[in-house]
């Protein structure tokens, strides 16, 4: 897999660290944000190849960030979510998410989904 610049937008520090370490081990450059507002700033500043986005952020729903991002950008977005209702998944995909991964997830599945995107 070709190394990429990734932005992980996740408010849970343990999950962010777990994802960052696993992806850096794969050779990726990983940036982090823990809020919706910081995620928007980092996405604009870092110009990542892929966003990994949690929906439950302390200052808003990650789908708001997805809507804002899609107004100006086509960067692939992989959503991490504990929400497993079919309607919610459809809503995410219709909002512009490229893929989603339900929590809890395995790192191998995350790596493969990143590779596909």
Image (cartoon, helix red, strand yellow):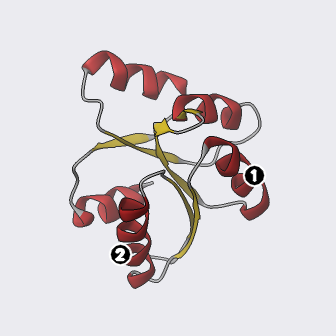
> Which residue carries the number 2 mark?
22
User: Extreme top residue here?
Assistant: 87
In the displayed structure, would residue 56 be above or below residue 89? below
Give the x, y percent position of residue 74: 65, 42
Task: Specify few, some or many for label 2: CA neighbours under 10 Å numbering under 14, 14-19, or 20 or more.
Answer: some
In the displayed structure, would residue 3 be above or below residue 33? below
Under circle 2, the secondary element is helix
Task: Name the residue rendered at 49%, 22% in the picture.
Answer: 94
Residue placed most toward the observer, 94 or 52: 52
Give the x, y percent position of residue 60: 58, 31
Tell me if 66 is positioned left or right of 100 in this view: right
Tell me if 73 is positioned left or right of 100 in this view: right
Task: Name the residue rendered at 68%, 51% in the picture.
Answer: 38
Give the x, y percent position of residue 86: 26, 20
Q: Work out which quarter of the rendered image holds the N terminus and state it.
A: bottom left
Residue placed most toward the observer, 95 or 54: 54
Task: Specify few, some or many for label 1: CA neighbours under 10 Å numbering under 14, 14-19, or 20 or more.
Answer: few
> Which residue carries the number 1 mark?
41
Task: Name the residue rendered at 23%, 53% in the picture.
Answer: 105
Dot placed on the residue nearer the N-terminal end, 1 or 2:
2
In the displayed structure, would residue 40 be above or below residue 72? below
Q: Work out which quarter of the rendered image holds the C terminus and state it.
A: bottom left
Distance between mark 1 and mark 2 Cα atoms: 24 Å
Residue placed most toward the observer, 113 or 31: 31
Q: Quadrant of residue 46?
A: bottom right
Q: Quadrant of residue 68?
A: top right
Residue 115 visible in rendering: no
In the displayed structure, would residue 82 be above or below residue 105? above
Q: Which mark is residue 108?
A: none
């Amino acid at each position: 897999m070709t190394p990429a610049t990734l932005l992980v937008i996740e408010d849970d520090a343990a999950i962010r660290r777990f994802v960052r370490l696993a992806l850096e081990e794969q050779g990726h450059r990983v940036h982090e944000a823990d809020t919706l507002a910081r995620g928007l700033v980092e996405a604009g500043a870092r110009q990542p190849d892929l966003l990994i986005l949690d929906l439950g952020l302390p200052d808003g729903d990650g789908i708001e960030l997805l809507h804002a991002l899609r107004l100006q950008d086509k960067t692939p977005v992989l959503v991490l979510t504990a929400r497993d209702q079919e309607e919610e998944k459809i809503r995410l995909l219709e909002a512009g998410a490229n893929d989603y991964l339900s929590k809890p997830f395995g790192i191998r599945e995350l790596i493969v989904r990143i590779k596909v995107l």
